[in-house]
Image (spheres, grey):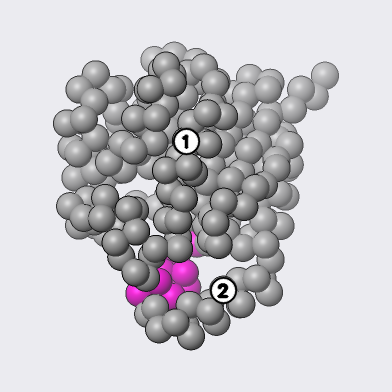
Protein backbone atom coordinates (compact mmCIF):
# COMPACT_ATOMS: atom_id res chain seq x y z
CA UNK A 1 0.00 0.00 0.00
CA UNK A 2 3.05 2.25 -0.13
CA UNK A 3 3.36 2.30 3.66
CA UNK A 4 6.81 0.72 3.44
CA UNK A 5 7.99 4.17 2.34
CA UNK A 6 6.68 6.05 5.40
CA UNK A 7 10.09 6.20 7.18
CA UNK A 8 11.56 7.76 4.04
CA UNK A 9 8.92 10.48 4.01
CA UNK A 10 9.18 11.10 7.74
CA UNK A 11 12.87 11.81 7.18
CA UNK A 12 12.23 13.76 3.96
CA UNK A 13 9.70 16.13 5.55
CA UNK A 14 12.41 18.49 6.81
CA UNK A 15 14.03 19.09 3.42
CA UNK A 16 11.21 18.22 1.01
CA UNK A 17 10.80 21.83 -0.11
CA UNK A 18 14.47 22.05 -1.05
CA UNK A 19 14.14 18.99 -3.27
CA UNK A 20 11.00 20.07 -5.12
CA UNK A 21 12.44 23.55 -5.68
CA UNK A 22 15.28 22.05 -7.73
CA UNK A 23 18.13 22.45 -5.24
CA UNK A 24 18.96 18.73 -5.39
CA UNK A 25 20.86 18.24 -8.67
CA UNK A 26 19.93 14.57 -8.99
CA UNK A 27 16.21 15.26 -8.80
CA UNK A 28 16.13 18.64 -10.58
CA UNK A 29 14.66 17.22 -13.80
CA UNK A 30 12.12 15.12 -11.90
CA UNK A 31 10.70 18.29 -10.32
CA UNK A 32 11.13 20.56 -13.35
CA UNK A 33 8.00 22.73 -13.79
CA UNK A 34 6.86 21.58 -10.35
CA UNK A 35 4.60 24.57 -9.73
CA UNK A 36 3.02 24.29 -13.18
CA UNK A 37 2.39 20.57 -12.69
CA UNK A 38 0.61 21.17 -9.38
CA UNK A 39 -1.39 24.07 -10.79
CA UNK A 40 -2.48 21.96 -13.77
CA UNK A 41 -3.68 19.14 -11.54
CA UNK A 42 -5.54 21.57 -9.27
CA UNK A 43 -7.19 23.39 -12.16
CA UNK A 44 -8.55 20.14 -13.63
CA UNK A 45 -10.09 19.02 -10.33
CA UNK A 46 -13.74 19.88 -9.77
CA UNK A 47 -16.07 20.01 -6.79
CA UNK A 48 -15.05 18.19 -3.64
CA UNK A 49 -11.56 16.76 -3.95
CA UNK A 50 -9.89 13.75 -2.33
CA UNK A 51 -6.12 14.23 -2.31
CA UNK A 52 -3.76 11.32 -1.73
CA UNK A 53 -0.17 11.83 -0.58
CA UNK A 54 -0.68 15.37 0.64
CA UNK A 55 2.96 15.69 1.73
CA UNK A 56 3.65 19.21 2.97
CA UNK A 57 0.51 20.62 1.35
CA UNK A 58 1.74 22.25 -1.86
CA UNK A 59 -1.02 20.85 -4.08
CA UNK A 60 -3.49 21.34 -1.24
CA UNK A 61 -2.68 25.04 -1.21
CA UNK A 62 -3.54 25.39 -4.90
CA UNK A 63 -6.77 23.43 -4.52
CA UNK A 64 -7.89 25.62 -1.62
CA UNK A 65 -6.97 28.77 -3.55
CA UNK A 66 -9.35 27.61 -6.30
CA UNK A 67 -12.16 27.19 -3.79
CA UNK A 68 -12.15 23.40 -3.71
CA UNK A 69 -13.29 21.46 -0.63
CA UNK A 70 -10.39 19.10 0.14
CA UNK A 71 -10.13 15.85 2.05
CA UNK A 72 -6.44 15.04 2.51
CA UNK A 73 -4.90 11.60 3.00
CA UNK A 74 -1.26 11.27 4.15
CA UNK A 75 0.43 8.27 5.81
CA UNK A 76 3.47 10.15 7.14
CA UNK A 77 2.95 11.71 10.57
CA UNK A 78 5.78 14.19 9.96
CA UNK A 79 4.25 15.30 6.67
CA UNK A 80 0.79 15.63 8.22
CA UNK A 81 2.25 17.83 10.94
CA UNK A 82 3.77 20.15 8.31
CA UNK A 83 0.51 20.39 6.38
CA UNK A 84 -1.69 20.86 9.44
CA UNK A 85 0.47 23.78 10.50
CA UNK A 86 -0.28 25.45 7.15
CA UNK A 87 -4.00 24.64 6.99
CA UNK A 88 -5.54 24.40 10.44
CA UNK A 89 -9.04 23.71 9.10
CA UNK A 90 -8.06 21.08 6.53
CA UNK A 91 -9.77 17.70 6.94
CA UNK A 92 -6.57 15.65 7.00
CA UNK A 93 -6.48 11.93 7.70
CA UNK A 94 -3.93 9.19 8.30
CA UNK A 95 -4.24 6.76 5.40
CA UNK A 96 -2.93 5.69 2.03
CA UNK A 97 -4.20 5.13 -1.52
CA UNK A 98 -6.19 2.05 -0.49
CA UNK A 99 -6.72 2.26 3.27
CA UNK A 100 -8.32 5.50 4.44
CA UNK A 101 -11.24 6.54 6.67
CA UNK A 102 -14.82 6.82 5.47
CA UNK A 103 -15.18 10.39 4.24
CA UNK A 104 -17.92 12.70 5.53
CA UNK A 105 -19.13 13.64 2.07
CA UNK A 106 -19.30 12.80 -1.64
CA UNK A 107 -16.15 13.12 -3.78
CA UNK A 108 -16.09 14.60 -7.29
CA UNK A 109 -12.36 14.40 -8.07
CA UNK A 110 -9.39 12.39 -6.84
CA UNK A 111 -5.91 13.90 -7.17
CA UNK A 112 -2.31 13.10 -6.37
CA UNK A 113 1.16 14.19 -7.43
CA UNK A 114 4.46 12.31 -7.21
CA UNK A 115 2.99 9.42 -5.20
CA UNK A 116 1.05 6.78 -7.18
CA UNK A 117 4.32 4.94 -7.93
CA UNK A 118 4.39 3.78 -4.31
CA UNK A 119 1.84 1.12 -5.28
CA UNK A 120 2.63 -2.04 -7.22
CA UNK A 121 0.70 -2.49 -10.47
CA UNK A 122 -1.62 -4.91 -8.68
CA UNK A 123 -2.25 -2.33 -5.94
CA UNK A 124 -2.80 0.38 -8.56
CA UNK A 125 -5.51 -1.81 -10.08
CA UNK A 126 -7.06 -2.30 -6.65
CA UNK A 127 -6.97 1.44 -5.95
CA UNK A 128 -8.50 2.49 -9.28
CA UNK A 129 -11.28 -0.04 -8.81
CA UNK A 130 -11.97 1.46 -5.38
CA UNK A 131 -12.08 4.98 -6.85
CA UNK A 132 -14.54 3.86 -9.53
CA UNK A 133 -16.94 3.07 -6.69
CA UNK A 134 -16.37 6.42 -4.98
CA UNK A 135 -16.95 8.54 -8.06
CA UNK A 136 -20.16 9.13 -9.99
CA UNK A 137 -20.20 9.12 -13.78
CA UNK A 138 -17.91 11.87 -15.15
CA UNK A 139 -16.00 11.95 -11.86
CA UNK A 140 -12.30 12.48 -12.43
CA UNK A 141 -8.95 11.12 -11.34
CA UNK A 142 -6.07 13.52 -11.98
CA UNK A 143 -2.63 12.21 -11.12
CA UNK A 144 0.83 13.47 -12.02
CA UNK A 145 3.72 11.09 -11.54
CA UNK A 146 6.84 9.64 -13.08
CA UNK A 147 6.02 6.92 -15.61
CA UNK A 148 7.49 5.37 -18.73
CA UNK A 149 5.91 5.09 -22.15
CA UNK A 150 6.89 1.42 -22.30
CA UNK A 151 9.66 -0.93 -21.17
CA UNK A 152 12.10 0.37 -23.79
CA UNK A 153 11.58 3.90 -22.47
CA UNK A 154 12.23 2.57 -18.95
CA UNK A 155 15.56 1.03 -20.03
CA UNK A 156 16.64 4.22 -21.81
CA UNK A 157 15.76 6.43 -18.84
CA UNK A 158 17.74 4.19 -16.50
CA UNK A 159 20.71 4.34 -18.89
CA UNK A 160 20.60 8.15 -18.98
CA UNK A 161 20.45 8.41 -15.20
CA UNK A 162 23.28 5.90 -14.78
CA UNK A 163 25.47 7.77 -17.28
CA UNK A 164 24.94 10.98 -15.30
CA UNK A 165 26.15 9.24 -12.15
CA UNK A 166 22.89 9.80 -10.29
CA UNK A 167 23.10 6.72 -8.06
CA UNK A 168 20.33 7.74 -5.64
CA UNK A 169 17.87 8.55 -8.41
CA UNK A 170 18.69 5.33 -10.25
CA UNK A 171 18.12 3.35 -7.06
CA UNK A 172 14.72 5.02 -6.61
CA UNK A 173 13.72 4.29 -10.21
CA UNK A 174 14.75 0.66 -9.86
CA UNK A 175 13.32 0.11 -6.37
CA UNK A 176 9.94 1.85 -6.40
CA UNK A 177 7.00 0.78 -8.53
CA UNK A 178 7.17 3.13 -11.51
CA UNK A 179 5.01 1.71 -14.27
CA UNK A 180 4.30 2.35 -17.96
CA UNK A 181 1.57 4.27 -19.73
CA UNK A 182 0.63 1.02 -21.44
CA UNK A 183 -0.12 -0.59 -18.07
CA UNK A 184 -1.87 2.47 -16.69
CA UNK A 185 -4.15 2.78 -19.72
CA UNK A 186 -5.23 -0.85 -19.34
CA UNK A 187 -5.88 -0.44 -15.61
CA UNK A 188 -7.97 2.70 -16.01
CA UNK A 189 -10.00 1.31 -18.90
CA UNK A 190 -10.53 -2.01 -17.09
CA UNK A 191 -12.08 -0.10 -14.19
CA UNK A 192 -14.41 2.08 -16.24
CA UNK A 193 -12.34 5.18 -17.03
CA UNK A 194 -11.26 6.92 -20.21
CA UNK A 195 -7.73 8.22 -19.67
CA UNK A 196 -5.46 10.68 -21.46
CA UNK A 197 -1.78 11.39 -20.83
CA UNK A 198 0.23 14.60 -21.17
CA UNK A 199 3.98 14.82 -20.70
CA UNK A 200 4.92 17.52 -18.19
CA UNK A 201 8.71 17.05 -18.04
CA UNK A 202 11.30 14.35 -18.80
CA UNK A 203 9.88 12.14 -16.06
CA UNK A 204 6.37 13.20 -15.13
CA UNK A 205 3.13 12.51 -16.97
CA UNK A 206 -0.26 14.04 -16.26
CA UNK A 207 -2.95 11.34 -16.14
CA UNK A 208 -6.55 12.52 -16.47
CA UNK A 209 -9.15 9.77 -16.18
CA UNK A 210 -12.91 10.32 -16.47
CA UNK A 211 -15.40 7.75 -15.25
CA UNK A 212 -17.51 6.61 -18.17
CA UNK A 213 -21.28 6.45 -18.11
CA UNK A 214 -22.03 2.85 -19.12
CA UNK A 215 -25.75 3.43 -19.70
Q: What stretch is highlighted in magenta?
A: 168-177
Check residue 39 in the rendering and tell me which mark sits there, or answer none: 1
How far across and down, in percent of the image, does residue 180 sit?
64, 60
How far across and down, in percent of the image, does residue 54 sit?
35, 38
Please tell me whether residue 142 belongs to the stretch shown in magenta: no
Residue 110 in sight: yes
Q: Main secondary structure of the magenta part?
A: helix
Check residue 157 in the rendering and tell me which mark sits there, or answer none: 2
Q: Which residue lies furthest to the right in this view?
A: 215
Cα distance in 3D space between marks 2 and 1: 26 Å
Task: Between label 2 and label 1, give the one nearer the viewer.
Answer: 1
Q: In this view, does 156 lie above or below 88?
A: below
Instruction: Using residue 199 as the reference point, say whether residue 146 is left or right of it.
Output: left
Crowd rating for badge 2 (residues with CA inside 10 Å; few <14, some 14–19, many 20+): some
Residue occupying image coordinates x 76% and y 22%: 213
Residue 134 in sight: no
Check residue 114 in the rendering and tell me which mark sits there, or answer none: none
Q: Name which of mark 2 and mark 1 comes first in the sequence.
A: 1
How far across and down, in percent of the image, does residue 146 sit?
52, 57
Q: What element carries label 1?
A: helix
Residue occupying image coordinates x 52% and y 46%: 144
Q: Is residue 126 above or below residue 154?
A: above
| Figure quadrant of residue 53 | top left
The quadrant of the image that shows the C terminus is top right
Q: Residue furthest top?
A: 105
Crowd rating for badge 1 (residues with CA inside 10 Å; few <14, some 14–19, many 20+): some
Amino acid sequence: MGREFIPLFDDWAEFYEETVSGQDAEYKEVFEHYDKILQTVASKAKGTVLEFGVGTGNLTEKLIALGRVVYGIEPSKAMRKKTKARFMDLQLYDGDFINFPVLPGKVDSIVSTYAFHHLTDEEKDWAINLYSKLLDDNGKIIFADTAYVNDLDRQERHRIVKDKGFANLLSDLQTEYYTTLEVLEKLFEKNGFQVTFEKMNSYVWLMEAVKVNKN
